[in-house]
Amino acid sequence: MTECSSALRLIFPQWQGADISVLIPELEPDEASTGYYLGAELLNFLAPENPEQKTVTVPVSLEVKDRKIQDGILDRDIILEQTKDALNILQRENPDRIVTLGGECSVSVVPFTYLAAKYEDDVAVVWIDAHPDITMPGDVYPAYHAMAVAALVGRGG
């Protein structure tokens, strides 16, 4: 394996891939999902800094618009735009390693995809999560965070 020399700390506070309001009805829908944004900020604050590691934040809007399902995915257009922004950052910075501190589960899709392309046949992913993230577009729960692993294997929209 190639020796890793550069690392990037990627702050990706995406919240649009989740729809927590269906799980926690006591919270206002806007407050429930945007909590992922705060979670990313807290992780960035709490995780030890590495002076040799550049930090870049993916721009993510806190504006809650009329959330709609397109092609079986909630907020698909916004997620696609933020995904492109994250990928552009990684391509520009060209890191060998990535520490992703983010919102919901789907923020891992871009770094994993980038690293898989960079290292071709010499990459492995160990996914440990409370749920399998293999929901498909069009399933009963349209939130993209539950489709992360499905997306990584080319089935998530």
Image (cartoon, rainbow, N blue to C red):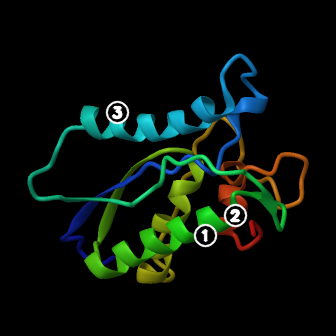
Q: Residue 106, labelled with which disc? A: none
Residue beneath label 2, please?
76
Query: Contact (CB < 8 A) between labels 2 and 1?
Result: yes
Neighbour class for label 3 at 10 Å: few (<14), some, many (≥20)?
A: few
Residue 84 vs residue 77: left or right?
Answer: left
Residue 51 vs residue 126: left or right?
Answer: left
Task: Kindly report the distance in space between the C-alpha atoms of the residues bearing marks 2 and 3.
Answer: 26 Å
Please name the residue shown 35% across and 73% down the image.
89
Residue 42 vs residue 113: left or right?
Answer: left
Badge 1 amino acid: Leu
Q: Provide residue 28's location: percent of width, then percent of height.
A: 66, 25
Badge 3 amino acid: Leu
Residue beneath label 3, please?
42
Quadrant containing the C terminus is bottom right
Residue beneath label 1, please?
80
Task: Kindly report the distance in space between the C-alpha atoms of the residues bearing marks 2 and 1.
Answer: 6 Å
Can residue 155 be seen in this snapshot? yes
Query: Contact (CB < 8 A) between labels 2 and 3?
Result: no
